[in-house]
Amino acid sequence: MVGHQRGAEQAHRHDRAEPHQPARSARRRGRGGVREARASRALPLVRTVTVLALLAVALLVSAAAGILVGAVPIAPGDVLSALLGADNTSGTIIRELRLPRVLGAALVGGALAAAGALLQGMLRNPLADPFVTGTSAGASLGAVLAVALGFEPVLVPLAAFVGATVSIALVWRLARLGGRTTVLTVLLGGVVLTSFAGALVTLVLVSSDRLALRLRAVLGSSPSA
C-alpha cells in the first residue's frame, strides 16, 4: 500500500513537471534564435567597417603616391615642410601642382561615387550608370557644341552640365510616354538617347573645322592629312 502511494506521488510529480519542459525548450530555442539574429546583423556591419577601412587606407596611399611620385621625386619630409610654408622648389611643386590635383581627384571621385550610388538606389538596379541612362551622352554633346560654337573654355563645363540636365529630362519624358514610369522604360529611354546623342557628337566632330583640327591632333595626324 505504501509503495503504491509513493508510486502515485512520483507519477503525479512527473505529470506536473512535464508541462514545464516544452516551455523551457521553447525559451532555449528563443534565446538561440535571438543570438543567431544578433550574429547575422553584426556580420554585415563588420564587413562594412572592414571595407570602409580598406578603402580609407587605399585613399591615403593613393594621395601619398600622387604627392610624392612624379617627374621630380619628393621626400616625405619635404611634404611636411611644404605644408608648413617652406619656400623652396619642392614646396612650390606640392602646394601649387600636386596637392590641388590630389584634392581635386579625391573630391571628384567621391562625387562620382555618390552620384552612382544615388542613381542605382533610385532605379533599384546595380547596372544603372550615367552611360546607360544617357546622362554622359548629353554632357558630351553639350561640351562638343560649346567648343564648336567657340564658347570660352570656362563655359564648356557649364554647357556639359546643361546637356546632362536636358538629357535627364528627355529620358524621363520618354519613360512616361506609356503613362507609367518603370525602371525598364527609363533604361530603354537612356539607351535610345545615348545612341542619338552619340550620332550628333560624331556629326559635329566631322562637320566642324575647329574640332576637326583638334581631333587630328589627338589622333596624331597632321592638319593637311
Image (cartoon, helix red, strand yellow):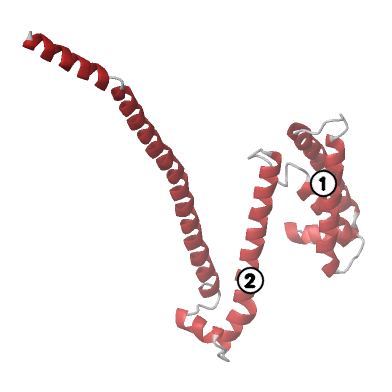
- Between the residue at mark 2 and the residue at mark 1, the CA separation in whole angstroms equals 30 Å
Determine the residue positioned at 64% across, 80% down.
96
Res. 2 image quadrant:
top left
Query: In terms of secondary structure, where does tag 2 sit?
Result: helix
Amino acid type, callout 2: Arg
Is residue 30 visible from the viewing direction of this image? yes
In the structure shown, which secondary structural element does the residue marked by tag 1 occupy? helix
Q: Is residue 210 above or below residue 128?
A: below
Residue 73 higher or lower than 54, as above or below: below
Taking the image as shown, residue 204 lies to the left or right of residue 90, namely right
- Residue wearing tag 2: 101
Q: Nearer the viewer, mark 2 or mark 1?
A: 1
Residue 91 is drawn in which quadrant?
bottom right
Residue tagged by mark 1? Answer: 168
Which numbered disc, 2 or 1, marks the residue that appears first in the sequence? 2
Q: Quadrant of the N terminus?
A: top left
Q: Is residue 122 left or right of residue 174?
A: left
Badge 2: residue crowd in 10 Å (few <14, some 14–19, many ≥20): some
- Given the image, on which type of amino acid does mark 1 rest? Ile
Q: Nearer the viewer, residue 126 or 210?
A: 126
Whether 91 is drawn above or below 149: the answer is below
Residue at the (43%, 49%) spot, across then down: 46
Residue 47 percent location from the top left of the image:
45, 48
Residue found at the very far front of the displayed protein: 1
Residue at the image position 10 percent from the left and 9 percent from the top? 4
Q: Position of residue 84 (x, y in %)?
A: 54, 87
The reply to whether residue 202 is in sight is no
Query: Hey, which residue is sitting farthest left in the picture?
Result: 2
